[in-house]
């Protein structure tokens, strides 16, 4: 158990809908990262927050957005869902940012868009 | 562009064998290289190697970093079926905090 929690574990929804994925980082970690893993793409970085502020953006679609709240939990919002958005979404956290701190991954949310 | 390349893509061994996984990288301003093990779900952190820590060992797993030749090796000795997983190598690119992952090596250990 990494100490990072994610809810829900599974989500099944229809195209065009909107969902929210939630992540609580490990105690003491200020940085939260969101990754998407699909069968043909591997682990792809989406976005990072550090202490409430957006720090880095990866290949995140405009239909997706995220935020980190004062209690450091983070939410990833996916809207106008398409079949291709079906994937595993991981949240990771680290004590700080800068490339010298290991990231610990949550158990993931499996999103299925039908 | 920063690159992380793992080899082989997959391998099958028998219990008790030793496996060696490779990760080569091209990253500007190297800071660290991380190894993860991914079974059914989330990647589990194994090791982080930096300029000041180029060798790590934990039980039957060990890893080294060659900063000159820009690669890392993950060794698993006396493999067990529980070692079956995808092993991922990741590097944070220059001036960035995300992790760029290699495609992974799928290790299957047969009893």
Image: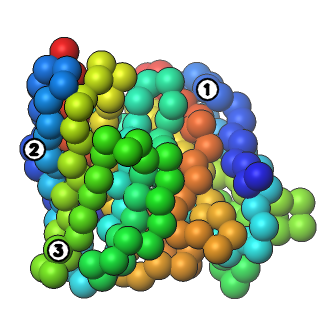
Residue topped by disc 1: B10
**Image location (x, y in percent) of residue B43:** 39, 49
Q: Is residue B91 left or right of residue B73?
A: left
Residue topped by disc 2: A8
Q: What chain does mark 2 sit on?
A: A
**Image location (x, y in percent) of residue A113:** 21, 22
A3 and B78: which is toward the camera: A3
Give the quadrant of the C terminus of chain B.
Answer: top left
Q: What chain does mark 3 sit on?
A: A
- Between marks 1 and 2, how big is the CA–CA gap? 31 Å
Instruction: Find numbered disc 1 in the image and state the secondary structure of the residue it sits on.
Output: strand
The residue shown at (23%, 31%) is A80
Q: Is residue B84 above or below residue A95?
A: above
Discs 2 and 3 lie in a common subunit: yes
Residue topped by disc 3: A69
Q: What chain does mark 1 sit on?
A: B
A63 and A92: which is toward the camera: A63
Tell me if mark 3 has few (under 14), some (14-19) or many (20+) residues whose alpha carbon lies within 10 angstroms of its own.
few
| Foreground: disc 1 or disc 2 | 2
Tell me if mark 2 has few (under 14), some (14-19) or many (20+) residues whose alpha carbon lies within 10 angstroms of its own.
some
């Amino acid at each position: 158990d990494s100490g990072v929690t994610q809810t829900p574990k599974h989500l099944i929804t229809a195209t065009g809908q909107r969902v929210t994925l939630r992540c609580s980082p490990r105690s003491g970690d200020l940085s939260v990262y969101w990754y998407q893993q699909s069968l043909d793409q591997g682990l792809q970085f989406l976005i990072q927050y550090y202490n409430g502020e957006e720090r880095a953006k990866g290949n995140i679609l405009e239909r997706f957005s995220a935020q980190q709240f004062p209690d450091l939990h983070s939410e990833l919002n996916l809207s106008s869902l398409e079949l291709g958005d079906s994937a595993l979404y991981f949240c990771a956290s680290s004590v700080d940012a800068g490339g010298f701190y290991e990231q610990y991954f949550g158990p993931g949310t499996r999103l299925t868009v039908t | 562009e920063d690159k992380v390349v793992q080899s082989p893509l997959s391998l099958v061994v028998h219990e008790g064998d030793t496996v060696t996984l490779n990760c080569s990288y091209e990253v500007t301003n190297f800071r660290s290289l991380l190894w993860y093990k991914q079974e059914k779900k989330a990647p589990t952190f194994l090791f982080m190697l930096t300029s000041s820590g180029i060798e790590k060992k934990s039980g039957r797993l060990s890893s080294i970093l060659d900063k000159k030749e820009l690669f890392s090796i993950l060794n698993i000795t006396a493999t067990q079926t529980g070692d079956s997983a995808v092993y991922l190598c990741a590097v944070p690119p220059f001036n960035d905090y995300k992790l760029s992952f290699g495609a992974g090596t799928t290790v299957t250990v047969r009893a």
